Amino acid sequence: MASAKTSWSEENFSCSICLDVFNSPVSTPCGHNFCRTCLTKFWDEQVKYKCPVCNKIFATRPDLHVNTLVSEMAAQFRMTLLVKEQPCVEPAEVPCDVCTEIRLKSVKTCLVCFMSFCQTHLEPHQRVTVLKNHRLVEPMDRLEDRMCKKHNRLLELFCKTEQECVCPSCTEGDHRSHPVVPLKEEYQVKLAQIGKIEADVSQMIQEREVKIKEIRDTVKRNKADADREIADGVQILTALMHCIEKCQDDLNQMVKERLKTTKKQAEDLIKELEKEIEDLTKRRSEVKPLSHTEDQLHFLQAFRSLKDPPPTRDWTTVKFRPPSYVGTLGRSLDELEETLNMEMKNLRKDVELKRIRQYEVDVTLDPDTAHPKLILSGDGKQVHDGGVAKKLPDNPKRFTQKMYVLSRQCFSSGRFYFEVQVKDKTVWYLGVVRESINRKHWSIRNPETGYWILSYDKGGLSFRDIHRIRLPLRAELQKVGVFVDYDEGVVSFYDVEARVHLYSATGCTFSGPLYPLLSTCSCDGGKNSAPLIITPVNQTD
């Protein structure tokens, strides 16, 4: 038999007077239902007793009795409405311990009942006098884990000595002499510690992420260096292979030319010999008949008519000596070695300068550091001696004893390179210095005091070390390149036009930022008036 399930709405269980779900519903003789309180109050205010719905008048006031069936159905419907109004428990929330079919979200936990209740099942604790005295707290899950196994009381204290949670009864026993605080107080302490731990861990994570980025960037730069090394190697080896191929072609050509010449000489000699043989053969054919003539008169007359013999070479003195190839390959290899050495030297210069030029930086001069006599161009790329010291405001960054100027840029890691034109100057200094050098008083200029500079004067080119290091100079310098590898502690100088390495200071100890330094020195009555110019690097050279 098919079962029919009736779907009831709120109207079926609502009082027509208060329009709410029945509360202690009673029925009139005409069959209509109302809340007992609502109907009683309604009739108390009427002269005649009638039904509020159909207006049927009753002779006497009817006795009111609770309709048990309607009351139970209304209670069940009211519970259904409460369930719909209350949220169901989410995975991270505490479920009601009383709900059976649909477990609702708990709103309170009773520490006496050791149970959690939704809003509906909490109602007795808000109504019944005995239950009102129970201690209600915010919902707690796994309440059994929050209870002391020994005293069956809530763990609401923290023992600082044993570093464990305890109940009030524990403080009267094993933990009597130990300092204890409420869980909330220790929670705040530990939460602060967790905050610091989290901050420290976050900092450590950040440092390691930075290190990872640094390693990846290093690998990326290393790959670029490797690619550049391969490209340079291909360029150099290709050039050397061309030299070897040319040497081979020259050797082949020379040997072939010699062989050709030898063959020509041999052919010429053979032709000459064959011609003489031909002439001699004719001579023999003329003479031979006479050798058999016995007629003396005829013999003498014929002999006198013989032609003179053809001229011939004395072949006993002729020696045919073909050229020897001994030593030819050796001489060719010697020439190849000399060519390769020269080519390698030139290629090495090109590659080295090309490589360090990849680290070009944009350097501009800082007017706040310039000696009062120095004049800077508007773009900060040129400096020369103005001859007269300008009146400038006192500036702790400015040089007052030496005609120096620093760049605006400083460098504390990695590699950098810049070029300075020194053409037509008779005296100059340039290089890099520490930020901490003395700018107001004279001091020794060497690596120990924070100077790594190249100088040029009438004594020639030199590097300023503890003792001045004189450097060879083949021709007048036009442009100087300065390369610094901060991490490796290297400062190198190059003759850009000649592509010649001038000097490298190695094993340097840099502490703090490095600044490029330029010094035009005195103009010397116009003899040294040319400016020092920071020039852009031509990567195509």
Image (tube, rainbow, N blue to C red):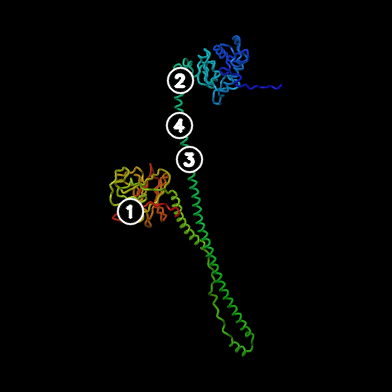
Residue visible at 53% across and 65% down in the picture: 255
Say the numbered circle drawn on residue 199: 4
State the CA–CA distance, disc 1 to disc 4: 57 Å
Q: Earlier in the sequence, mark 2 or mark 3?
A: 2
For disc 3, the neighbor class at 10 Å (few under 14, some 14 to 19, many from 20) is few
Q: Secondary structure at mark 4?
A: helix
Q: Earlier in the sequence, mark 1 or mark 4?
A: 4
Q: Amino acid at mark 2?
A: Pro
Residue that label 3 marks: 213
In the picture, measured across the screen, residue 402 lies left or right of residue 104, that is: left
Seen from the viewer's position, the closer of residues 466 and 492 is: 492
Q: Amino acid at mark 4?
A: Ala
Q: Where, quadrant-wise, is the C terminus in this rendering? A: bottom left
Residue that label 1 marks: 427
Residue furthest out toward the right: 1
Q: Where, quadrant-wise, is the N terminus in this rendering? A: top right
In this view, 94 is above or below 301: above
For disc 2, the neighbor class at 10 Å (few under 14, some 14 to 19, many from 20) is some
Q: Secondary structure at mark 1?
A: loop
